[in-house]
């Protein structure tokens, strides 16, 4: 009986040694990390339409002011895009 117990223990120890070692691999995972973006934004322009008086009755003055305002707004948007371009990497 003791001989059987000893044989079982020895066989259990040998079976434990027979299992293959685990394969350890190092894997590099690229994870994007949020980085705060600190850029100096350009100041908002004073639009040309704000200089036109509400009492102005000449339509041409209003149309030129609106056209100038649109051009100012587009230029301001381009400046904002250029300033924040580095933050969108």
Image: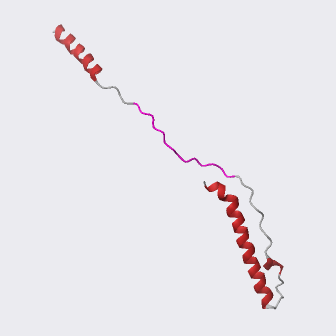
Above or below, 22 relative to 42? above
> In the figure, is residue 81 to the left or right of 51?
left
Residue appearing at x 79%, y 69% in the figure:
45
Q: Position of residue 66 (x, y in %)?
A: 75, 81
Q: Position of residue 44 (x, y in %)?
A: 77, 67
| Quarter residue 72 falls in | bottom right
- In magenta segment, residue 32: yes
In this orientation, which residue lies closer to the viewer: 9 or 59?
59
The total of numbered circles placed on residues is 0
Figure coloring: secondary structure
Q: Which residues are magenta?
A: 24-37
Above or below, 42 relative to 28? below
In this orientation, which residue lies closer to the viewer: 6 or 65?
65
Q: Quadrant of the C terminus?
A: bottom right
Q: Quadrant of the N terminus?
A: top left
- In magenta segment, residue 9: no
> In the figure, is residue 35 to the left or right of 55?
left
Considering every residue shown, the one lying at the far top of the view is 2
Residue appearing at x 80%, y 87% in the figure:
61
**Secondary structure, magenta segment, majority class:** loop
> In the figure, is residue 29 to the left or right of 85?
left
| Quarter residue 68 falls in | bottom right
Above or below, 7 relative to 77? above
Residue appearing at x 52%, y 45% in the figure:
31
> In the figure, is residue 51 to the left or right of 71?
right
């Amino acid at each position: 009986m003791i001989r059987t117990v000893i044989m079982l223990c020895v066989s259990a120890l040998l079976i434990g040694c027979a299992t293959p070692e685990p394969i350890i691999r190092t894997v590099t995972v690229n994870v994007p990390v949020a980085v705060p973006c600190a850029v100096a934004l350009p100041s908002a322009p004073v639009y040309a339409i704000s200089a036109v008086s509400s009492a102005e009755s000449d339509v041409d003055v209003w149309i030129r002011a609106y056209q100038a305002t649109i051009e100012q707004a587009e230029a301001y948007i381009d400046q904002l895009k250029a300033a924040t371009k580095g933050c969108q990497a």
